[in-house]
Amino acid sequence: MDYLDFIDAVQALADGVLFGATYALLGIGFTLIFGVMHKINLSYAAASIGAAYASLLILGNVKAPPPLVFALAALAGGFIGAGVYLLCFKFIPLANPLATLMSTVGMLLLIDEIVVHVTDGVPLSYPALFSDVIIRTGAFNLRGDLMFVFALGCVCMVVLLALLYRTRLGLATRAVSQEPTAAQLCGIGLDRVNSLTFVITGVLGGIAGAMIGAAIGVLSPLLSLPLTVKGLIVTVIGGLGSIPGAIIAGLLVGGLENVFQFFRGVSERDLYIMLLLFIFLVFRPGGLFASAAGRD
Amino acid sequence: MDFYLGLAQIIGVHTLLGLSAYCVLLTGQVSLAQAGFFAIGAYVAGMLTVLAQWPLIPALLVAAIVAGAIACAVGFPALRVKGLMLVVATTAFGEAVRLFFFNFNYQLERGELRIGPHGGEGFRQIRYFPENGWSTFDVVVFIWIVVALTMAALWWMDRSRAGAVLRAVGEDELAAQSSGLNLTAVKVSAMTVGGVIAGIGGGIFAHYTTHIEHVQFGVVLATFAIAYPILGGLSNVFGTLIAVVFIQGLLIEGLRFMGDWRNLLFGGLILLAMNLRPRGLLDAPALAELKRRLVRRKDRARA
């Protein structure tokens, strides 16, 4: 491999890591819901894309500045999150994991179809910030829009960690995730904490959806299934219920994905990500950061 | 008429797919790899009849054995984890199989045609049925004989010790382990049986559609596979059949007159069904009620 190839490979890695911030946010959403409710919410990635769509549709033909669009996406994400909790979890007995799994699948299909129905299946272009800025460092270029996406992702993660570890709501959330019965006996309303978790992850998902739209440039309902798979892979590699794990795994998957794409082409790219997942499952089934008991 | 025969074929094959997921679900594990085993069965059976010119039944048997063996091999590492981890591991396996066939190229020259799987274009010209003069009706009868045999075998298994063992593991792993059951062995055998059934289903699927390609075996098919038994209820094999008829017959074909709105209703109705009947359409209380009514009618007839 000569020098130029090497530079291209490093460039691919850097771009991938920057895009990986979106995977990290999706992974955090899956992991947080799993940590609090011990349930899988398969509709999460679809809801994120749906929130990004909603931000475009609410504005209609008005040409709004991108920050407003992102804020609307976050808001819509929160509402969709509350809706998902209401429709898929609230009325279904939690002792029956299969039922909630299936209801979130139904939700995933429903959100996708609503998006297709409203937009006639035509991909919509999504605004980006700083897309004309390119930072040159030596032989490498860093795209401004990807840098922005990465920075926004980092801010979200810091805010989320502060929320979880510095506020009463975060304390309640962590208490419920450790021992729901004991938390309830201490006067924490399970229903309230659960629904708030869904709202918070929904807001995160809305931002992630907006970031994905900004990084790729278009939104399409076809994105939701691959993103679901990627988000789940990130969750497992990072370790279930571990937020730092999800962040690192998201960046790792994003970076490696782009490197594999550079060397082996787009059709084989995901195959190697699956292999990576299997390596983790065999040699480190708890993921990067999971506690020893976190294998459920 | 041909439309209904085609629908009967789809329902039959999807019942096999649902039953393969049913076996694994009985042990309490959610496997999204069934579409992968289905794909393996489809490609193996198709290649045997087209490239090696085998008759159908041996080809199906080999497809079943290959899919079962791969399911067994995947079961060992995958079943070390459970819950969400297993869902993700099996999803990844299913996707890996799909991507393998997306990149899989093995073509032979036969006359002017090149036959065999051809990467992203898929595998065309699986013409065993038309070449050997099977009519659509024959195919339907063949499919439903296979479905009936599979359902009878699973019904019998449910009645036997094996079914009790599977359900014991599914209800409470800790209790099952304490009473001396080898969890890994039980789960891996359930996975293997599921793989065999999915392999047969896939083999038949390849032959009646005559053209298979990788996109048909994606995550959507895998979710359908687990959707049937979960929607139908796990208390017996007929739940799966009812759910397949409900989804394929009613939701997909029956609502066609609604045009665009059908797809919207599809997800919504699954949500509604899960909210109203979280243990499936044909759950244990419903089954008991059904049995009570049948018995009462018999009593009345006697009196």
Image (cartoon, rainbow, N blue to C red):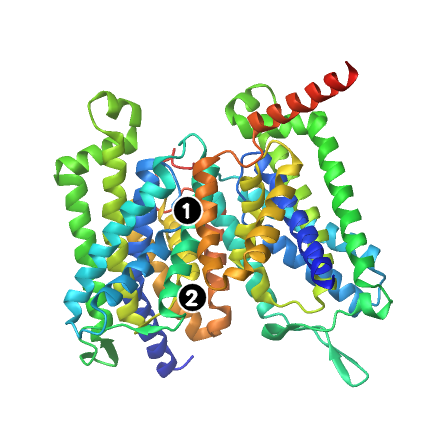
Residue type at mark 1 is: Thr
The relative height of residue B180 versus residue B214 in the rendered view (above or below) is above
Viewer-proximal residue, B67 or A48? A48
The relative height of residue B213 versus residue B84 in the rendered view (above or below) is below
- Identify the residue at image location x=76%, y=43%: B148
In the image, is A13 to the left or to the right of B22?
Answer: left
The relative height of residue A206 versus residue A238 in the rendered view (above or below) is below
The residue pinned by badge 2 equals A222
- Identify the residue at image location x=80%, y=59%: B137
The relative height of residue A138 versus residue A259 in the rendered view (above or below) is below
Q: For residue A195, say whether it is visible.
A: yes
Q: Which mark is residue A104?
A: 1
Look at the image and tell me in which quarter the N terminus of chain B lies.
bottom right
Find numbered disc 1 in the image and state the secondary structure of the residue it sits on. Answer: helix
x, y percent for residue B66: 71, 53
Find numbered disc 2 in the image and state the secondary structure of the residue it sits on. Answer: helix
Question: Circle 2 marks a residue in which chain?
Answer: A
Viewer-proximal residue, A9 or B116? B116
